[in-house]
Amino acid sequence: MRRFPGAILSASALAAALALTGCGVGAGAEPSGTQATSAASANAGVDAGISTTDTTTADSTLFTDGASHTVSVTWNEADYAALIAAYEADGSKDWIAADITIDGTTVSNVGVRLKGNSTLRSLSGNGSGAGGGMGGNAASSGISSDVPESLPLLIRFDKYVDGQTYQGLGEVSLRPGSPVLNEALALALTGASGQATQRYAYTTYSVNGSPTQTRLLVENPDENYADTLFDTAGVLYKADADSSFTYQGDDLATYEDQFKQLNNKDSETVQPIVDFLKWLSEATDEEFDAGLAERVDVESFARYTATMNLLVNGDDMAGPGQNYYLWYSLDTKKISVVSWDLNLAMNGDATASPEAQLSIGGGGAGGGMQPPGADDGGWAPFAGAAADAGGTAGAAGGTGPGGAAPEAAAGAGGGGRGGNELKERFLASQAFQSVYDAAYGDLYAQLYASGTAASLLDSIAAVVPLSDGLTAEELAGETQTLRTFIQERTDALKDQV
C-alpha cells in the first residue's frame, strides 16, 4: 500500500501519522514541477503545482503541510443560476466553469458542480426535493442556494482544460457542514490504522467575495488516486448511491453505471464484480464460508468492518448512501473495500457493542433511524455535517441535532436504501468470527486505548481556521463534543475487546 502504511501509533509516532493523514505538523515536500500551458506562465505554474500533464499527488502541500488554507471561487452569476435551476427542475448536476484561488494561486477555468443527494434535495425547499425521496429543508441540511458558499461541490481541475491539475490533483470534494471534526478525525484514524483513505485539508472558503466559511476539502478518488492507492496493480470501482450490490444477470452494461470504473479502462471491465456477485447470490452458507477467502481479502475486510463499528458509522457500504469503493487486485484476484464519506461517523451510540450491525437506513440489526434532511449533508451533531451520497444519519439509537427525535427510515435493500449481503453474511458467519475479533481488538488498541483518537483530535482542532461562519467558541464546543464521544467509546469497549 503506497499511501497509508500501517503503524501502531505511540505518542512519539503521532506526528508522522498526522502527516500521512493530512493534518500533520511541519512542511510537506515541494510539489512536482511540470510543463505549464504557456511560456509566460510556465514558472508560476510549476511553482504553484499547476500542471497540464499527469503527475503524482504524493507531494501535494494542500494535504501534507499541516496548515489550514484559503480557497475562494468565482463564477458567473448567470451560470450559477442556471446550475441551480437545472437541479430544481429534474435533479441534474450540471457543470459550470469557475476560477479557483488556493492560497493565492489561481487555477482558471475549472469545472464545478453540485455534489450529494438528499442534502441537495433540500434546495427545493419543500422537503421532498428534486428527484423525490427523503430530503429536508435548508435549515435541517445547513445549505441554501441563496448562500452558495454553503453548498457541497465537486471541483474538477481538468474539466475544461485537458490535463490540468493542481499539485497532481484532478478532483477535490468540498464537503458540506462546518467544521465536521468527526469526518476529519474518522479519515485520520482510518489512515493511521494502515487502511486506504482520502487526504483532506481545512480551509476558509468564499464564493464571489462572500463571507467566509470553514470547510473541509477532501481528495476525490479519480484515475490517478486509483493507480497510486496500493503497491500492486488493480482496478478501483466507485459504488453509485443508487447501486445494488446484487447479481442482476450477465450483461455488463447493467453494472457499469452502478460500479463506475476509475482506472485501467483499456484493459479491464466490471466483470470481476459481476462474477463475485453471481457467486455470492448462489453460495450456500457452507460455500460462502469455504470460498470467500478465495475471492475477498478477508483480513482487509475484517479490518474495514471493524473500523466502521469502532467509528460508529452506519452509512458505510451497507448504508443507504452506498458509500464505498471496491478494489480488485490484479495480482491476488481478490476484492477489498475502501471506505468513503465518513462524515456521519463518530456520533450516535458511543456504547454500541462490537457485534452491533449499525444502520441508518433500516438494513442490518442496528435498527437504523433517519433524521430530517439527512444525507451526505443531512444532519450530524457537528454543525451540519453531512454524508456524500444519499446517506441518512445517526447510528443505532442516535438522535438528531439538539436531541430531536429522528424519523423512521426506509427499509433495507438495494438502490440506495441500505443493506449489503457481503457484510451481513460475513458478520453473521462463525467461520470469520475470530478474524473479525482479532482485527477489532487490534484496531481498538491502536485507535482508542492508546489515546491516538484524542491526540489526533487535538491536532486537528489546532489547525481548523476560524471564519465568518465559525467562532472560537463554536469550535471549542464541537471539539469538546467529539472528545466526550471518544472517551465514552473508549470506556464502553474497554471490557468488551
Image: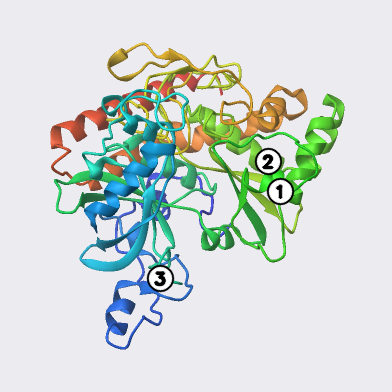
Residue at 74% from the left image edge and 24% from the top image edge: 429
Which element type, helix, strand or loop, lies under badge 1?
helix
Q: Alpha carbon of mark 1 to alpha carbon of mark 2: how far?
A: 31 Å
> Mark 1 highlights which residue?
253
Point 42% across, 55% down: residue: 20
Task: Assign the N terminus to one quadrant of the image.
Answer: bottom right
Looking at the image, the residue that sits furthest to the top is: 405
Work out whether residue 451 can be spotted: no
Residue 245 x, y percent position in the rendering: 67, 35
Q: Is residue 267 left or right of residue 121?
A: right
Residue 478 position by quadrant: top left
Tell me the crowding category of disc 1: few under 14, some 14 to 19, or many 20 or more residues within 10 angstroms, Cα based: few
Left of 239 or right of it: where is 91?
Answer: left
In the figure, 66 relative to 364: above or below?
Answer: below
Between 495 and 352, which is closer to the camera in this rendering? Answer: 352
Q: Quadrant of residue 300?
A: top right
How many marks on residues? 3
How far is disc 3 from disc 1 in space, using C-alphas? 29 Å
231 with respect to 483 (left or right)? right
- Residue at far bottom of view: 39
Find residue 233 and report its image quarter: bottom right
- At a point 55% along the width and 46% down the height, the residue shown is 195
Please name whichever residue, 483 or 258, is drawn nearer the observer in this view of the structure.
Answer: 258
Name the residue that disc number 3 marks: 161
Q: Which mark is residue 411?
A: none
Report the residue at 30% width, 55% height from top: 66
Tell me the kind of residue under disc 1.
Answer: Ala
Q: 123 and 466: which one is in front?
A: 123
The local crowd at label 3, few if under 14, some if 14 to 19, many if 20 or more residues have their Cα within 10 Å, is: some
Q: Mark 2 highlights which residue?
A: 299
- Of callouts 1 and 2, which one flags the residue occurring earlier in the amino acid sequence? 1
